[in-house]
Amino acid sequence: MDELGFDFTKAVAWFQHQQDQPYALVRLSPEQAAQLADEMAVAVRRCYITDELLANRATALGLQQSEILASRFPDPGSTMAGDFGEILCYFYQSVKELPAYAVGVKKWRLKQDRTKPAPRSDVVHFLMPNRPNASSEDGVLCAEVKLKSTPGSSTPITSAIDDCAKDRTSRLAETLVWLRERAMTEQLGDLDIPMLNRFINLVDHPPVSKRFRAVAVVCESLLAQELLAAPNAPSTDYSLLVIAVPHLKQTYEAVFEAGRTTVQV
């Protein structure tokens, strides 16, 4: 459980691999998809704003918490869809590292514009089992996520693979520096400057492992067609993960609507 207050052991059943090679495939059942709104509601709200900040700003400004939250949540559409894909990947990476604790970046709190995606790498987790002491067991998980919920010309698997290359060449390094700069003036929850320094200043610490993922979140009804673009052999540079969710558009919209109902009207 991290600062989202979510017990990730409850989500283990969501992310059972149906296959591992040449790519990992996860298919949520209709029953699991229908439960996501209830299960994820509070955690999704906390992805965008902490309980403390929400309560304090509502009191200070004389506004309802729902109005404060509305200034952070994305509207229905492409940004909400993309955010949901990233958050689902955040849950996946947190679950797959159990029983170890992976410190995840809540980058959705750092948006300059709620109507646009958050900048830099999509989903980043840090593994530092001996924190605050650096060790050779430390690592970084970095995922590039694409989502497709309705028919169209987008190619989430190909696009995720192509953009994952940007993380490997420069974007992850740029993301770490950006996070450190934000941490100088803002609280980043479980993440702090000493931890970021450990992963930025690599010459001063033991080497770290870096694992990169290309992630495609697709509607179950589109899965067969989208898998035609999947590679026939695994890559040594990244791993490919495909997550199929029944009724994906309705599911992510229900999750965000449930998040809205978790605060005072």
Image: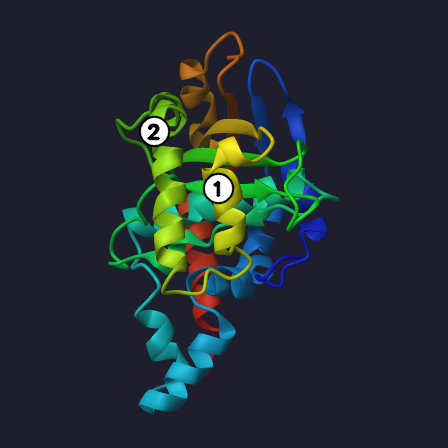
Q: Looking at the picture, how far across and down is residue 86, in whole percent?
A: 44, 44
Q: Residue at x 32, y 88 (%)?
A: 61
Check disc 1 and report the residue beneath it: 124
Image mark count: 2
Q: Residue at x 45, y 58 (%)?
A: 254
Q: Quadrant of residue 38?
A: bottom right
User: x, y (%) of residue 108?
Assistant: 39, 55
**Type of amino acid at the residue the image marks with label 2:** Ser
Q: Are marks 1 and 2 in contact (CB under 8 Å)?
A: no
User: Could you classify mark 2 by the number of other residues whose Cα lies within 10 Å: few (under 14), some (14-19), or many (20 or more)?
Assistant: few
| Quarter that holds the C terminus | bottom left
Report the side of 16 relative to 81 (left or right): right
For the residue pair 249 and 117, the one nearer the viewer reads as: 117
Q: Residue at x 48, y 50 (%)?
A: 105
Viewer-nearest of labels 1 and 2?
Answer: 2
Front residue (pair 155, 159) = 159
Q: What residue sits 32% from the left and 32% below the top?
A: 151
Question: Mark 1 belongs to which amino acid?
Answer: Val
Q: In this view, which residue lies farthest toward the front?
A: 204
Q: Is residue 218 visible?
A: no
Residue 59 image point, x, y percent: 40, 90
From the image, tell me which residue sits under label 2: 170
In the picture, which quadrant includes the N terminus?
Answer: bottom right
Q: Position of residue 3 (x, y in %)?
A: 58, 62
Between the C-alphas of marks 1 and 2, the distance is 14 Å
Q: Is residue 94 left or right of residue 78?
A: right
Would you identify the image quadrant in which residue 53 lies?
bottom left
Q: Determine whether 16 is above or below 187 in the image.
A: above
